[in-house]
Image (cartoon, rainbow, N blue to C red):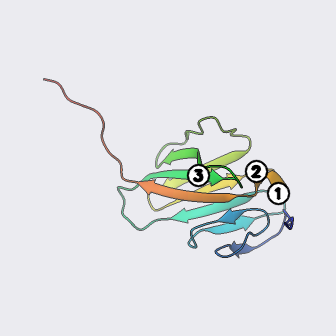
Amino acid sequence: KTNHLMCCRGTWNTTHTPALGVCVTPDRLNLYMNTCGEATIECNQKKGPTYYQMYWYRQLPGETMKLVVFTRMGNEKHDFGGFNEEKFSATKPNAESGTFTVKNLEPEDTGWYFCAVSKHSDTDTCES
């Protein structure tokens, strides 16, 4: 295995090979890395405005996929579950897009990062 550099400037399309320690799929996601040692992944969807919930998953080598954060448009506070908000952050400015950031990149952050969207569903019930 080759260790990749963790700091670089530019936009990387990582559809085929790991780039700079972070792999991103599917091919519509781009990896943006700055010299501060963090990577921000942007996810865009065209399913429509009712698909405003976004999920970010990570799969490390040899492990199963895990949900890192659940985001909803209009909420500034996102659900990171058991993951550390000092290590990860996310934005959800509108229904069509969102970002996910891995901070203080380390070789252990190498893995596959995925986004998914879902349509809002109302789970409240009415009783008469």
Residue 103 badge: 2
Quadrant for residue 115, please give it. bottom right
Identify the residue at horizontal 42%, vertical 53% (top origin).
52
Q: Which residue is mark 3?
A: 57
Question: Does label 3 or label 2 sit earlier along the sequence?
Answer: 3
- Residue 105 visible in the snapshot: no
Residue 94 in percent (x, y) is at 47, 57
- Residue 60 visible in the snapshot: yes
Give the foreground label among 3 and 1.
3
Q: Relative to 68, is 94 above or below?
A: below
Residues packed near mark 1 inside 10 Å, few (<14), some (14 to 19) or many (20 plus): some
Residues packed near mark 2 inside 10 Å, few (<14), some (14 to 19) or many (20 plus): some
Q: Are marks 1 and 2 in contact (CB under 8 Å)?
A: yes
Residue 85 in percent (x, y) is at 68, 40
Question: Does label 3 or label 1 sit earlier along the sequence?
Answer: 1
Identify the residue at horizontal 60%, vertical 50% (top origin).
65
Identify the residue at horizontal 63%, vertical 35% (top origin).
82
Question: Could you say which is closer to the camera, residue 63 or residue 116?
Answer: 63
Residue 21 in percent (x, y) is at 78, 62
Question: Could you say which is closer to the camera, residue 123 or residue 112?
Answer: 112
Mark 3 to mark 2 CA distance (whole Å): 15 Å
Q: Secondary structure at mark 1?
A: loop
Amino acid type at image mark 1: Gly
